[in-house]
Image (spheres, grey):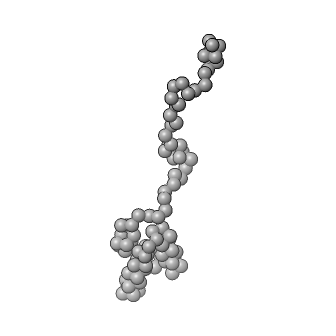
Amino acid sequence: MFKYLDTIRKLHATYGGTSWMSYDEDFRRRAAKDPTLPWGDVDLDLWMKWMAPLKSLITRRPRAEGEKKASLVPPQPPPPGTQSPTKEEKSQV
C-alpha cells in the first residue's frame, strides 16, 4: 500500500494537475472489482490513459558530465580586429 501511495505522490509531483486523481479513482475501482490486483505495480493501461498525454513538469537534465560537454556548442571566435595583437604583430609596429 505504501508503494501505491508513493506512486500517486510521484505522479502528482511529475505531472501536476488532477490526472493523478483520475488515475487513483480508476485504479481503486479496478481494485474493488479484482481483490488480487497488486497495489505495488503501476497499471500501465491507466497510466497510458491519464499520464502519457501530459507533458512532464520536470525538465530533463544531462546525467553525466560528458553529456553536458557534448551538448555544448563550441564558442565562436571573435570577429577579426577585436582580438589583441600577437607578439609578432606587436614587434612589427
Number of residue marks: 0
Query: Which image quadrant is residue 92 in?
Result: top right
Residue 19 percent location from the top left of the image: 41, 74
Residue 81 percent location from the top left of the image: 54, 24
Furthest residue in direction top, as rendered: 92
Comparing 88 with 63, the one in front is 88
Q: Is residue 86 above or below residue 33?
A: above
Residue 90 percent location from the top left of the image: 64, 16
Q: Is residue 79 above or below residue 36?
A: above
Comparing 49 with 91, the one in front is 91
Q: Is residue 88 above or below residue 29?
A: above
Q: Residue at x 37, y 72 (%)?
A: 50
Left/right placement of residue 78 relative to residue 26 reads right
Q: Residue at x 61, y 20 (%)?
A: 86
State the quadrant of the C terminus.
top right
Q: Residue at x 36, y 69 (%)?
A: 48
Answer yes or no: is residue 15 visible.
yes
Residue 10 percent location from the top left of the image: 50, 71
Answer yes or no: is residue 36 visible.
no
Q: Residue at x 39, y 66 (%)?
A: 54
Left/right placement of residue 89 relative to residue 36 reads right
